[in-house]
Amino acid sequence: MDLVLNLADEYVLDAVWARLLPASRLLPGYTAQESLLNKTVHGVQGTLGQISSADKLESWLPRDNIVRQTISLYVITYIGILLLYFSMAGASYYFLFNKELMKHPRFLKNQIKLEIQSSLRAFPWLDLMTVPWFVAEVRGYSRVYEKWDEYGLLYLILSVPFFLLFTDACIYWVHRIEHHPALYKHVHKPHHKWIIPTPFASHAFHPVDGYAQSLPYHIFPVLFPLNKYLFLGLFGFVNMWSIMIHDSDMITGTGWEHIINGPAHHTLHHLYFTCNYGQYTTMCDRFGGSFREPLPEDDPLKSITESPAETRAHLKQEKEE
């Protein structure tokens, strides 16, 4: 995250902080003439990045100040999740989500609006809980590294499946624990409001739920070395994966459904609650006895074409299971 913060500081936040808390107001020796000169130079040069650091306005909070870093990272994280959520969920909804599913008897009235509202309520609190991890990383309290060959090419390659398997196993148990009656009603139930989820339901959860399931992503680079560029890529990937598995698609018969925990598996989880807790693979569900293989007859689209009597019988069966 230090890469993102450094870029944001260089091109945006240095100027923002300098205007909010200019050094000329509080630092002795920083004269009004110097401030005016910097403003003049800045105005002549035009855009940020075209002038040297020495010519820019300065803030009395330096880049390495923990308060500045915390606030900056919060803003970056909040803007980032909004951009990712609306771009990726929007693309998945418009290009992948089958709109016929909106006719399903368990698809809620105004559900997409409700999913988006739930997500927007969660983001500020989720980011507030997440930012300390990013601050710790920026300040050196993690094992992220910059040089690609620092731990060798083999480790660099193997760290990808290692990260995915580690987080998959951890999220499985976090998710399964959240289904315990003592926690489910208070933490995880809001996410299961969406029986037939759309991609916009991917982040429509209680903030504590989202934070708990994101913890493995932050714990991994504290315990194990991980290239910082790779970490950014993986962090983006896992968020996109979370969006993708909420498109309620029931593609089966490919052979991959025995290994990969995809949209079909997660659709069954939302329909039946007690199966397919995994994130990327079926490994933990198989070991934990919670694996349910997606079958063509499980497709929620069938509830749209069947008779009312068949629908009632189907719903009764779901409750019994």
Image: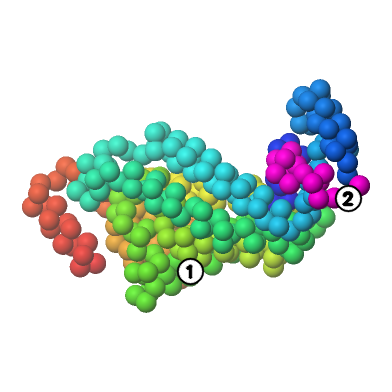
Check the picture and name the quadrant holding the C terminus.
Answer: bottom left
Residue at point 79%, 54% (across, down)? 64
Question: In the figure, 239 relative to 217: above or below?
Answer: above
Q: How is the image coloured?
A: rainbow
Checking the image for residue 174, the label placed there is 1
Q: Is residue 199 above or below residue 272?
A: above
Q: Residue at x 47, y 60 (%)?
A: 207
| Mark nearer the viewer, 2 or 1 | 2
Q: Secondary structure at mark 2?
A: loop
Residue type at the position of mark 1: Val
Question: Could you tell me if residue 213 is visible in this image?
Answer: no
List x then y, in percent, for residue 176.
42, 69
Give the residue number, with chain letter if any, for mark 2.
Answer: 28
Report the span colored magenta: 13-29
Task: Please say whether residue 296 is one of the residues in the magenta stretch.
Answer: no
Which residue is most to the left? 309
The foreground one among 78 and 105 is 78
Magenta stretch encompasses residue 14: yes
Residue 308 % position (x, y): 9, 49
Q: Residues within 10 Å of mark 1 (few under 14, many from 20)?
A: some
Q: Secondary structure at mark 1?
A: helix
Answer with left or right where residue 106 lies relative to residue 112: left
Amino acid tagged 2: Pro
